[in-house]
Amino acid sequence: MITTKQRAYLRGLGQKLDPIFQIGKNSLTPEFTEAIIENLEKNELIKISVLKNCDDEPKELAGILADRTHSEVVSVTGRKIVIYKQAKEKEKRKIELPR
């Protein structure tokens, strides 16, 4: 679990990111989820855009994604989702969270 202070820090970092994935009418497929998992391992923090043709609510999708990828929802703003997962190996960690 991340603290409120850490979430605020990650939210600030997330604002500068461009979305690297888009969720469309097919919603969350297993392939999409797998791609997110791989990307989280490399980048730790990613932004996802929910397209207008997606019938699901961004907050619901964020919760489902967090469960499936074992990550933390940093923020859901409009149709943008930011999620974080700390890299397993210390040497691969790119983000140093405040205490």
Image (cartoon, rainbow, N blue to C red):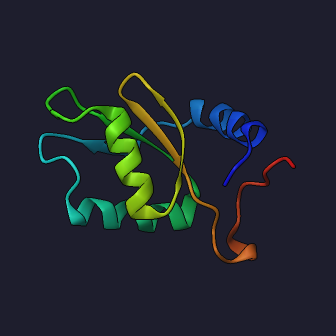
Q: Residue furthest right?
A: 99
19 left or right, relative to 51: right
Position in image of residue 4 (x %, y %) = 73, 37
93 shown above or below 60: below
41 shown above or below 10: below
Position in image of residue 12 (x %, y %) = 67, 31
93 left or right, relative to 58: right
Q: Examine the image and state in which quarter residue 22 appears.
A: top left
Position in image of residue 20 (x %, y %) = 40, 45
Instruction: Identify the residue shown where x is 27% and y is 32%.
Output: 57
Instruction: Identify the residue shown where x is 43% and y is 68%.
Output: 38
Q: Examine the image and state in which quarter residue 50 appears.
A: top left
12 shown above or below 21: above
Instruction: Identify the residue shown where x is 59% and y is 57%.
Output: 44
Instruction: Give the mark count.
Output: 0
Which of these two is toward me, 12 or 8?
8
Q: Quadrant of the N terminus?
A: bottom right
10 left or right, relative to 44: right
33 shown above or below 57: below
